[in-house]
Amino acid sequence: TKYVYEFAEGSRDMADLLGGKGAGLAEMTRLGLPVPPGFTVTTEACKVYLATGEEPDELGVEAAHSLAGLERAMGRTLGAPDDPLLVSVRSGARFSMPGMMETILDIGLNDMSVGGLAKASGQERFAWDSYRRLIQMFGRTVMGVDGDLFEQAITAHKERRAVVGDHELDTGELVALTDEFKDVIRKETGEDFPQDPAEQLARAVRAVFDSWNGERAHVYRHREHIPDDLGTAVNIQAMVFGNLGQDSGTGVAFTRDPATGESGVYGDYLPDAQGEDVVAGVRDALPLSELAVIAPRTYAELGDHLRALEDHYRDLCDVEFTVERGKLWILQTRVGKRTAEAAFRIAHDLRADGTISRDEALVRVDGAELTRLMFPRFDTTPADVPLAHGVPASPGAAVGEVVFDSTEAARRAAAGADVVLVRRETTPDDLPGMIAAQAVLTSRGGKTSHAAVVARGMGKVCVCGAEALTVDPVARRFTTEAGVVVHEGDIVSVDGTAGTVHRGALPLTASDVRRALETGTGTGPVTEAVLGALAHADSVRRLEVRANADTPEDAARARALGAQGIGLCRTEHMFLGERTALVESMILARDDTAREEALAALLPLQREDFIGMLAAMDGLPVTIRLLDPPLHEFLPDRTELAVRVASAVHPDPHDRQVLHAVERMHEENPMLGLRGVRLGLAVPGLMAMQVRAVAEAVTNRLRAGGRPYAEIMIPLVGTVEELRLARAEAERVLAEVTAETGTHLDCPIGTMIELPRAALTAGRIAEAADFFSFGTNDLTQTTWGLSRDDAEASFFPLYLEKGVFGVSPFESIDQEGVGRLVELAVEAGRTVNPHLETGVCGEHGGDPDSIHFFHRAGLDYVSCSPFRIPAARLEAGRAAV
Ligand code: ADP
Ligand code: MG
Ligand code: MG
């Protein structure tokens, strides 16, 4: 195995091995962009190290060889006393994890070479500043010294000099600081800061490997569903310096605006600074356009490189760059993270100018982004004066309690509160709080600050650089310019689209995209892009998209959002409210007559329900599931009732009667109890009433000139015998109604497949079914043998943490297990009945990954809640291209 690749040897296709950063550096080198030379240690080397605690044997030799090559190319030797070569040691995994792992700059400086650097650069202060930065970074990340100890030493010096910025410390102070830093390290670790450049390099590489398993990297991967075993590559690269004076600097640039998707170069620039200063937001950067004034030639050259990169990657790219004494260097590129708005707009624009195809444009956006665009936005009037304005870094509307640190954010969120994390600026240590928060608000930093980059990646609302706010995390409050004080726990509204923060909870209104989806028209670049992407998705997708809806209002809403029918109409919701009394008398009936009376009273109500559904979905299929839950769900709680009966002097006879029924019907495992088809077969007349209601509703709609397509669905079937019995009963009632009305009824009868036995015997079951609908919620519960309601609250967090599964099998279908059953059943069912219609109802019908799986499994449709329909249409389209 080869563990080291020079930049010139790699390419963009090698991101698995070289990491995203390494592959980008290699690709830019091949394109002839000005990249400081260097080489990459592969993720394979990292994996060996993480597994065994030792670098692979070959690594030392290969790295030494590449270093020698780098030294020859640069004409300098690592850490040489006269004119030293310095390198950076940069982490870079397959997937970008901004700031989550370590990078160490200025490796090669020591007590001797710092003088050489001073002489070669002609700048003594710069050399000592670089040296103290190295000791600080190395001490913290490699030697494990608490970073605060260094910060305290810096603060002490600044106070003594009465200055505020690090850059105001002079050479003498930096020299003194360097000594203090070394003392700190010695005191904390019992070891000296290593003077040997080779040792510095080797230990820095190890530290980067180790940072793969750091706490915050772990948290970030978990949240982003990045596997834990990929490892990171390490890039060793010749240093260039942006902090050599006013003709130097560093910045970040985008080929388009990552927040809005608008075309045109965009970014931040910080003169006389080292790269890490921009991302940390420690000093306020200038808009990139200023560089055009400061250094027009450099700006023009940067523009050329950005265009070249966008043409090459055919997508939005971002770069990190440094200018050293007027010479431009590109230090990083990648296809940049962007907001949902920008994703749609960029894909649309690139398609419109012919850079990418329609199919490709569709693949560039996803259902999660579309869903985000459908969330409500604030409905503000000019009278709503914001507390402050900042940079609109990540759009959306969020309301929550103000918190000032990550721990408090996580604590309150775990207790169910919506929180807004307010910081001066964020660091990677704030990650848990950012994950917990609805929005992030900072008083410093621009669109490329840590807060902005991370929030955008997560789709969180973010306003940064609200400079009018004075944030006091110790007193747990912030103060506005006008003197308004907002304390921890106070409610604020953060508008990430406008870049404002308001006191209290502002009213919300439907988003433009949502409104456009419901009406089919809308203006504005983002709306047009969304409608365009959906139109293409609709034209290519094979999967139909239906809705899970139980009321005519929901059905109408779903239809407006593009539903092609109802895949699941739950009838139990129609038994609630004032109707529970009727259900109760049905359950309590002492004899057939009493039961028939109760059922007869329910019939017209149920018929009206179905008429409403069929009218709302006129011309489209409506799949009606017969009653599924155990009957005692319609009765009062057992314990409450028992207490009432026991504590009353003269217990209500009705209460007693109900209690008796509740006790008789009590089940230890209701999920596996008398429910579904079992109920239909066990309670005389119930199924007949429901089927009759469907049949009469269809007749009614036909007479009204409608086109009703009702499908009767029998739940929780385990064997074909159950379905045969239920079907016979349903057909008997359908024939009865036809005889009464003279209207022919064409009503498919099918079943849910939600028990493993049903899936395994699907060939038999298909003999009696016109359609299968996979109830993947129950199928997941019964395949895994666990109860969703209990498990999600108890051991799922642990399982996710331990990586037993990367995502809950209730959220995204377990393709290997539950999915296998779906595949088996579809195949066996179709073999017996080539006209068998197959679909999915249940949460998975709206989940992007699951939709792709159902497409591959050859299903006819997915069904999901109305709000998820646009995203499901989009994903079904993406699955098909
Ligand atoms: P991250 O992945 O967190 O962005 P990087 O490896 O990109 O970390 O390093 C952080 C910053 O350090 C970069 O933005 C860059 O400006 C600076 N840097 C890294 N390597 C060099 C180098 N060889 N010369 C100058 N600056 C560098
Ligand atoms: Mg970087
Ligand atoms: Mg079910």
Image (cartoon, rainbow, N blue to C red):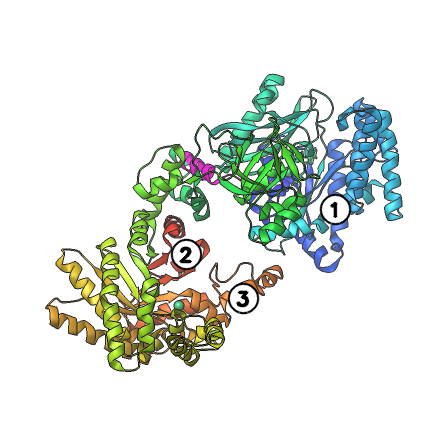
Q: Which of the pair 597/500 is nearer the observer?
A: 597
Q: Which of the pair 376/484 is nearer the observer?
A: 484
- Image coordinates for residue 566, horizontal then vertical, percent: 30, 58
Disc 3 marks which residue?
791
Disc 1 marks which residue?
205
**Residue at left offset 20%, top offset 74%:** 733
Tag 1 or tag 3, which sits nearer the N-term? 1
- Image coordinates for residue 323, horizontal then vertical, percent: 66, 26
Disc 2 residue crowd, few under 14, some 14–19, many 20+, Cα 10 Å? many
Magenta region, mostly helix, strand or loop? helix
387 part of magenta stretch: no
Q: CA distance from mark 3 to mark 1?
A: 41 Å
Name the kind of residue labelled 2 in the image. Answer: Ile
Is 467 left, or right, of 170 in this rendering?
left
- Image coordinates for residue 216, horizontal then vertical, percent: 66, 49
Tag 2 or tag 3, which sits nearer the N-term? 3
Q: Which of the pair 114/731 is nearer the observer?
A: 731
Disc 3 residue crowd, few under 14, some 14–19, many 20+, Cα 10 Å? few
Judged from the image, the quadrant occupied by ligand 2 is top right
**Residue at left offset 89%, top offset 44%:** 186
Disc 2 marks which residue?
851
Helix, strand or loop at mark 2: helix
- Between circles 2 and 1, the one closer to the viewer is 2
528 vs 695: above or below:
above
- Image coordinates for residue 815, horizontal then vertical, percent: 47, 63
Name, please, the residue furthest toward the left: 742
Q: CA distance from mark 2 to mark 1?
A: 41 Å
339 part of magenta stretch: yes
Residue 517 appears in the picture as rendered = yes
Q: Specify start and end residues of the magenta stretch as a single range.
A: 336-350
